[in-house]
Image (cartoon, coloured by chain):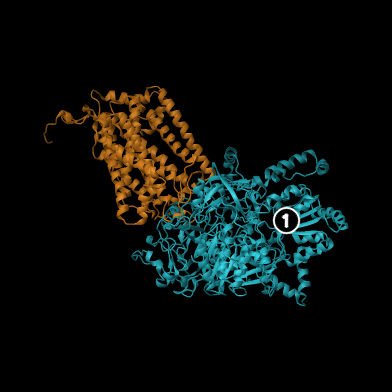
Amino acid sequence: MEARVIHESLKPAPVIAPGHTFESVTEKINAVVLTKKFGFGWIVGLAIAFMLANLLLLSTAVILIGGVGGFGINAPVGWGFDIVNFVWWIGIGHAGTLISAILLLLNQSWRTSINRFAEAMTLFAVACAGLFPLIHMGRPYFFYWLLPYPNVIALWPQTRSPLVWDVFAVTTYATVSLMFWLVGLIPDIATLRDRTKSTVLKYVYGILSMGWRGSARHWHNYESAYLLLAGLATPLVVSVHTVVSFDFAVGIIPGWHSTIFPPYFVAGAIFSGFAMVLTLIIPVRAYYKMHDFITDRHLDNMAKVMLATGLIVFYGYANEVFYAWYSASKWEQYMMFGNRMQGPYMWFYWALILCNGLVPQILWSKKMRLNVYVLFIVSIIVNIGMWLERFIIVVTSLAQDFLPSSWGMYYPTVWDFGFFIGTIGFFLSLMFLFVRFVPMISVFEVRMLLPESKPKGAAAHE
Amino acid sequence: MPEDRAQAPSGAAEIAALHAERAAELQRIKGRLAGLGEGKRYWRSLDELAESPEFLEMLHREFPQGASEWSDPVSRRQFLTLMGASLALAGLTGCVKGPKENIYPYIRQPEQIIPGKPLFFASAMTFLGYAEPLLVESHMGRPTKIEGNPDHGSSLGSTSLYAQASILSMYDPDRPRTITHLGEIRPWSEFSAQMAPVLEEQKKQQGSGIRLLTPTVTSPSLAAAIRRMLAVYPQAKWVQFEPAGRDNAREGARRAFGEVVDTVYKFEDADVVLSLDADFMVCGPGAVRHARDFAARRKVRSADPAMNRLYMVEPMPSSTGSLADHRIAMRASDIGAFASAVAAGVGVAGVEAPASLSPRQRRQAEVIARDLAAHKGRSLVIAGEWQPPEVHALAHAINGALGNAGKTVVYLPSAEAQPVNQWTAIKDLAEEMEQDKVQLLVIAGCNPVYDAPADLEFARRMEKVGLRIHLGLLADETAALCQWQIPECHFLESWGDARAHDGTVTLVQPLIAPLFGSKTLIELVALLAGEGAKSNYELVRDYWKSQLNRPDFDQFWAKCIHDGFIPDTASQPKAVTASTDRAAFAPTAPGADGIEVVLRPDPCVFDGRFANNGWLQEVPKPFSKVTWDNTALMSPATAKRLGVQDEDVVEIAVAGRKVTLPVCIQPGHADDSVTVHLGFGRTRAGKVGNKVGVNTYVLRTYEAPWVLTGAAVRKTGKRYALARTQMHWNMEGRNLVRHTDLEHFRKEPDFVKKYDYIPPASITPRHEYRDNSWGMVVDLNACNGCNACVVACNAENNIAIVGKDQVRRGREMHWIRIDQYYEGDPESPSLHTQPVACQHCENAPCEVVCPVAATVHGDEGTNDMVYNRCVGTRFCANNCPYKVRRFNFFQYQDYTTDLLKMARNPDVTVRSRGVIEKCSFCIQRLNAARIDSKLEGRPIRDGEVKTACQAACPPQAIIFGNMNDPESEVAKAKTLGHNYALLTEYNTEPRLTYLGSVRNPNPEFGEA
């Protein structure tokens, strides 16, 4: 190691508050699951979220029975909230894998106290996202026709279609994310198994911990598996949203047909994923007083990632505008300057520029990054902005494409909103259950951050 | 008002009699029930419950009961009721196998029927009295599709949109199924028995109390039957009435020539045509033929075409007007003055250009008159059906002065059996009813309660008549006020005859036995005449047997039935002498300043007779593209002056009569003029047509049938959402409709090509089509946007109607649509129509993105839909640059109504909820032709396959065929310089291309 002197003020803030021991970490994090009472806030929150989740049930029933016409889609706008929300949720689902896999490979130790939380969020977001393509189909009961399975009706997916790629990309992503999360949970679940006083939970945790005893061999196998899964998940972070972007980029509609889409979608996904992690983790940290583990350093880092990806996204917008002009294609030019900037949905476009382009610039200031209130509000604005971005891409492009005779407007119905709000309720319900029944912070990984877990002599760094 | 009275019997005595009858009936049923044992009855009813067809049917539905009602304009049910029932039943549907169906062979094979192969029979539809000759496709005894009779001069194979839609009227589930008396079911025998004493009574007074009200009759056999009846009752009167009939034309001819004549136009010889508000390609007898002949002179097939020139003067853009070389928007009430100016210009003696014209209009009239005069004997002036008689008389006089009579315009003796002024006839009838002179009123096929002039108070006066009998296809507003309601046969269920526009006797042949034991007018007349139980067929055949008086009648008759008409019965041109009474054309003084209201039959539901026809309700009206409503159409300037916008509701008041209508701003409409369509706001049209739009007949009086002057239009502040299929009318500089004028075309015959961008050649080898490679060309110079193709496609391809609410959401299902664009000044824009169906792209953007290969390329180049495979992701529709793909957002097809099942084409899949559909180039017709050609070991001949739109198209704007055959018409059209495809930039290589539009303006006209 190169010897150098770093001034105190330039040293990064610690990723764990000083003074913790193995026992105190385990106690504090697991207390939420094992000993604490169901808080009043938690019960009320879950109740509200669950009520909203029932809206999802109702909307699904309405759409399945009555038909997909219950949504506001029409000709020319064949995709509406269904696909907007699908892309939005998938994007949100990006932060988890990025934090767990890529930051793990990059050896970013600050990831450890937020990765469990972010991964859970990913899983739940992907679950929500998956509902949309399913329910948006005209005949959802034939969804399996998109899968290559042996059959007697000579049916095989048409592999030139990005929707088929989507099926593979999303299901792979969901599977790997789930595996990654479950594997990462094993040592902590074993701890819970050993500590819980409830017989029922002992069995449940016992099964989930898969016979974990904490032997050196277990640890060895565990570390290899985790690393391999991280390696597997890393390309998926890039591939999922790249493939999702192909749903549009492969189409010929002006506003869709664009080569910038894959990188810009991936950056946008990370942007929105981090925004959602912040939106959720700030109140959770306050409610369960987890400031020791989720420190200001974490928030600061996440805000920085958000700022960086936000700039990439903003570059994407600028790029779209530039190439619309530079293409000299009247179709592209009309789409950008006539339709998006001045058309019937112009307010959505300018709100998008405000939410995703201008507001995040506030994060250049460290003071602002460390102000949880500002950060919380910015993260929500970014979530809204990213939703608007998908709306602009999906709806405005379709509303005014080639033949002016077919131009039309899209108006969402109560079921569009019902379904969307329902998935938010579903997502929040799962989050509420997650923080109460699973350690929301990876106990064993945080313990590794403690100086006592480091080999003698290495403790000086970090 | 009529709707409140419902079917209530009018007199107290009648009600009492009814109650007594019902009580007796109840007693009889009780008696029968008593004969059954207690236990037996119990089990019997449970059995019925368990095996009721509704229950069994519910078990094997794909979607729960009621799912289709969501979209149904007809029966919107409470949402929660539906939810509850559907959820309760949803579980049952999943685990039950499909229904067991047995297919039985014929025990005795009917002659000619090969299951799966349709037969075609000649027949005819009468519209405003005149026959439209048809060829009707029949599948196993069910008529399913109507085509024009190619051998008949009035059709030559094409049809109007009304004829196309008429098949749906036959299968209308709202048709009354039995004869009823005060709402009680009665057999025909009882009707005739009850009529006997009434008629006996009338005979004593020579039938002075009998009035027979019918639509216009040209049918020789029916007219003869009516005359026989009138011979029995010499004092009885026969009244004919059509609310949108030809009184103006009749009266105009009478003024010009002193007698009523029919006018037939020879467009093939007319170089210059002036239309005075005449939508002659769509309206009037012979419109189908006129459209074809007129368009033939506009089709550009060489670099130096001999095109005709059309001047159009009209208040509201019409289909014909969209093809005009010069279109002058003018208030309907000014057209008479304009016609006078033209007449003066061509030298009609005694006519002067009125001073009321503006200098600009005067200049325009002068230029037109000069052009007409330069083409003496090769020009033509046509007066619109709804223009007053003096305009018709002026048109006759101008044609006379130009020497056109006998050349481009031919006068024939009137085809009508009794050409009378119907407008005064209905007034006389109303007055006679008021004076209690009428004791027996027989109304057949008319609906005067709804459509007679409002100031005649027909409904109130009609109830003064003792016995009222209604014979009609539907139980309409008039039927509701009649004691006897007799279901009338649809023309596809009856024998008959009628004269076509050229006078040819055209035979009406039934395609199916009457579905509901209904009766024809001729049978009813024969009954009244005391001729007893002669059948419909006997009455028609016997008449012609006696008329033709041939030894070989039976063979000859069989041939006539086969051909659809009696040969050599066309009327001979008639020499007419022009009246010298110049007062005949004195235009009535233009009304007071202010806004005029122009009443017109609706371009879709006409005078309201088609109000219950969903196809016609849903077909977008030309230009405005409004469906399921009538509107107050006005120019942008008038709207601005009134301070109203699209969809604002205005109140129109004329002489104390008021209607409220939503505004529809119509570029190209004349200023200070509001066009209002009749035919809406019906209360007893049926489930489809009730309460659609606003009844504007309430504005219409005896004195002012068509143009109401001095109207007050007031904004109400309310808004009303219209269901329009097109919302954006500017091409945005996209060269979608490419057009030029003739002078420029001669210099640059491939003017369309300069807009093309041809992408570089592909590196992948192209697919070679060895045998057939189908393609289509649409000639924009011939298409007038009349909608016949849209309705024909509806009928051929089992296209569902979706209702007003769904159209408003942009979910109409039409496979072919007619795009409408305006260019230039919004006050006098140039009008462009462009039919767009699936373009069957060679590089189809839809095919690549379908995840389940539900849309694929056929081996003859068509882009095919595999409905069974479609899972409904709609990616194909999104990726279609032409937006021609349609999605079944709901269960739009009615799977439950038996009658509608019969109407469907068995060769075309009835699409279910959740799948995409689109134009297939009528692949079922291609397949039928392929089978025939294979059996005969030959290729498919050019012209052997006609798509439904092509076959129906009156101006023959659509060409379809094999592009691989260099001799085919389509291949030749594709080689023309002005053939172009839409969006070549995207390298989709459409198989549907367009021939650019070429106008032939008069250079002298300039900015006149």
List x then y, in percent, for residue B852. Answer: 45, 54
The x, y position of residue A42, in whole percent, is: 41, 26
Tell me the residue at 76%/55% (across/down). B429
Residue farthest right in this picture: B204
- Screen quadrant of the N terminus of chain B: top right
Q: Which chain is cyan?
A: B
Can you say whether A114 is above or below B722 in the image? above
Side of A334 relative to B272 (left or right)? left
Give the camera-side residue of B47 and B331: B331
Residue B322, image x and y in percent? 51, 61
Tag 1, which secondary structure?
helix
- Residue B552 relative to residue B126: left or right: right
Residue A402 seen in the current view: yes
**To which chain does the residue with label 1 belong?**
B
Question: As displayed, is residue A197 above or below residue B853?
Answer: above
> In the rendered view, does A9 fall on the left or right side of A225?
left
Mark 1 Cα shell of 10 Å, populated few (<14), some (14-19), many (≥20): many
Which hue is chain A drawn in?
orange
Counting the numbered discs, the total is: 1
Q: Amino acid at mark 1?
A: Ile
Q: Is residue A286 left or right of residue B798?
A: left
Picture quadrant where residue B445 is located: bottom right
Instruction: Examine the rendered structure and indicate whether residue B409 appears above or below residue A248.
Output: below
Rendered location of residue B501, percent (x, y): 65, 68
* Residue under pointer 1: B426
| Depth order, front residue of B621/B384 | B384
Residue closest to the eye, B317 or A431: B317
**Residue B945 appears in view:** no
Q: Quadrant of residue A90?
A: top left
